[in-house]
Image (tube, rainbow, N blue to C red):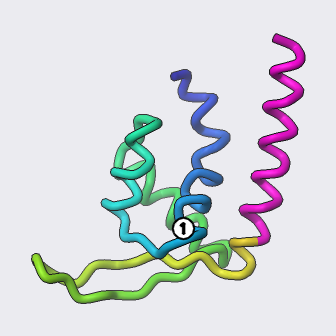
């Protein structure tokens, strides 16, 4: 898949994976990688930007198999932003589909 296609939608994908459940970074990478190729470095840059913008919060949770993990939780502002971005994306895809 073209990198420019992915660049514009990865934030939405990350937020969408957090709507129903909190996740830690590696878990998010694995979930998204099932559909789109993404590196952990790219994911963590997106998560930092989302946190800086107040769309996600973090907390540590003990792990049974190693050190504590940093979990990401979508905020109310993040939920609103995710819905707004989702609506824009669906409208965009519909317009592109009409052109194809």
Taking the image as shown, residue 83 lies to the left or right of residue 29, namely right
Q: Seen from this angle, which residue lies furthest front? A: 20
Image x and y of residue 52, in percent: 61, 74
Residue 8 drawn in magenta: no
**Residue 95 falls within the magenta-colored stretch:** yes
Going by the picture, which residue comes out furthest to the top?
A: 100
Looking at the image, residue 20 sits to the left or right of residue 29; the answer is right
* Residue displayed at 72% across by 81% down: 76
The quadrant the C terminus occupies is: top right
Residue 82 located left or right of residue 29: right
Please, what secondary structure does the residue beneath circle 1 have?
Answer: helix
State the image coordinates of residue 6 (x, y, percent, origin top left): 58, 35
Image quadrant of residue 26?
bottom left
Which secondary structure type mostly characterizes the magenta part of the structure? helix
The magenta segment is 80-100
Residue located at (40% from left, 51% from top): 31
Q: Is residue 96 above or below residue 76?
A: above
Q: Where is residue 98 in the image (x, y as percent from the top left)?
A: 88, 18
For disc 1, the marked residue is: 18
Q: Residues within 10 Å of mark 1 (few under 14, many from 20)?
A: many
Relative image position of residue 37 (x, y in whole percent): 41, 35
Left or right placement of residue 70 versus residue 36 in this view: left
At 61% from the left and 53% from the top, the residue drawn is 11
Q: Is residue 35 above or below residue 16?
A: above
Name above or below for residue 10 compared with residue 36.
below
Q: Nearer the viewer, residue 17 or 42?
A: 17
């Amino acid at each position: 898949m073209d990198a420019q296609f992915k660049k514009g939608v990865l934030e939405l994908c990350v937020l969408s994976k957090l709507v129903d459940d909190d996740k830690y970074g590696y878990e998010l990478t694995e979930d998204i990688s099932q559909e789109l190729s993404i590196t952990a470095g790219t994911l963590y840059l997106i998560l930092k930007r989302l946190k800086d913008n107040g769309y996600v919060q973090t907390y540590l949770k003990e792990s049974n198999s190693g050190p504590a993990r940093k979990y990401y939780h979508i905020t109310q502002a993040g939920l609103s932003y995710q819905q707004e971005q989702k609506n824009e994306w669906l409208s965009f895809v519909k317009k592109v589909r009409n052109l194809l």
